[in-house]
């Protein structure tokens, strides 16, 4: 978890903008004071209030609805939800999308795709095309994650990241490291990644999926890799 301490006004603004659920602890002190928290995947926004005006505002406008049940989260702290429930209430449907990339030898290739509509990513797969299968090196690696390149979430200042286009915020990867050369060559050296059953990770509009193909050990021959994304919209 990454903890970010904020002023009360900034805390309220972020919680409202991201529709986060406010949690609080009320110490046994007189006059009263509150420690406030809001969870956003692996990020915890926090603030403490003791001024009478802030306490009055919190107790009048937020306390009654605070300390509600949080969304279910996976082992990485990311928001998850039940597809069987939200697929019905929000009219979300399972979909798949594929991308084709050419990765040359001797370098690390990065391929980004912008999310044009909020998605719930549920997993993915990759495979190598038949015409380039012989070029796969034993140490070729693939990684997959999500990045914020344009400060869509407004966190660049909090982390001291340079403004776009220089800075980038990378979130915990879905796939930290997988070797490409696995399985049967006849099946295109493929692999599949699935999140826990009936769960998915929310990825907001304007963020980017990022596929990294590390072929620094390969000395010759491009490979064509097809990456398939499973998601709900």
Image (cartoon, rainbow, N blue to C red):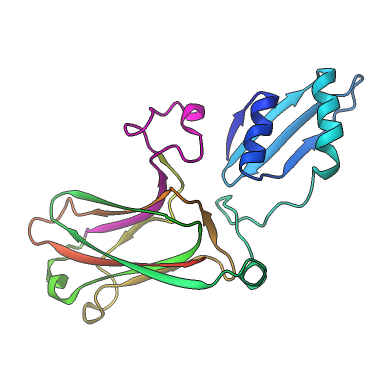
Measured as percent of width and height from the top left, residue 75 is found at 57, 55
83 left or right of 165 in image: right
Residue 13 or residue 83, whichever sits in front: 13
Q: Is residue 81 above or below residue 54?
A: below
Q: Quadrant of residue 177?
A: bottom left
Name the outermost residue toward the right. 30
Q: Residue at x 90, y 27 (%)?
A: 28
202 left or right of 15 in image: left
Q: Which residues are magenta?
A: 139-168
Q: Is residue 155 above or below residue 119?
A: above
116 left or right of 186 in image: right
Residue 24 or residue 87, whichever sits in front: 87
Measured as percent of width and height from the top left, residue 80 is found at 60, 59
Q: Residue at x 30, y 72 (%)?
A: 190
Quarter of the image where the N terminus is located: top right
Q: How many marks?
A: 0
Q: Quadrant of residue 49?
A: top right
Q: Residue at x 84, y 38 (%)?
A: 63
Residue 27 or residue 158, whichever sits in front: 158
Decide whether residue 157 is among the magenta residues: yes
Measured as percent of width and height from the top left, residue 124 is found at 41, 67
Q: Residue at x 58, y 47 (%)?
A: 41
Q: Is residue 100 above or below residue 150?
A: below
Q: Main secondary structure of the magenta part?
A: loop
């Amino acid at each position: 978890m990454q903890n970010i301490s904020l002023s009360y006004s900034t805390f309220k603004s972020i919680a409202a903008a991201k529709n986060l659920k406010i949690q609080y602890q009320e110490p046994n002190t007189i006059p009263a004071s509150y420690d406030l928290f809001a969870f956003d995947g692996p990020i915890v926004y926090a603030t403490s209030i003791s001024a009478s005006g802030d306490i009055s505002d919190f107790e009048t406008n937020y306390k009654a609805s605070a300390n509600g049940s949080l969304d279910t989260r996976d082992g990485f702290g990311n928001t998850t939800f039940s597809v069987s429930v939200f697929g019905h209430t929000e009219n979300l449907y399972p979909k798949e999308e594929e991308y084709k990339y050419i990765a040359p030898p001797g370098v690390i290739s990065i391929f980004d795709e912008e999310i044009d509509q909020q998605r719930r990513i549920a997993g993915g797969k990759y495979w190598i095309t038949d015409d380039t299968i012989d070029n796969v090196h034993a140490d070729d690696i693939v990684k997959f994650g999500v990045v914020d390149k344009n400060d869509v979430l407004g966190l660049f200042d909090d982390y001291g990241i340079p403004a776009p286009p220089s800075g980038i915020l990378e979130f915990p990867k879905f796939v930290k490291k997988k070797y490409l050369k696995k399985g049967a060559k006849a099946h295109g050296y493929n692999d599949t990644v699935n999140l826990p059953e009936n769960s998915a990770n929310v990825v907001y509009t304007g963020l980017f999926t990022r596929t990294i193909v590390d072929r620094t050990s390969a000395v010759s021959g491009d490979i064509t890799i097809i990456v398939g994304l499973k998601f709900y919209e």
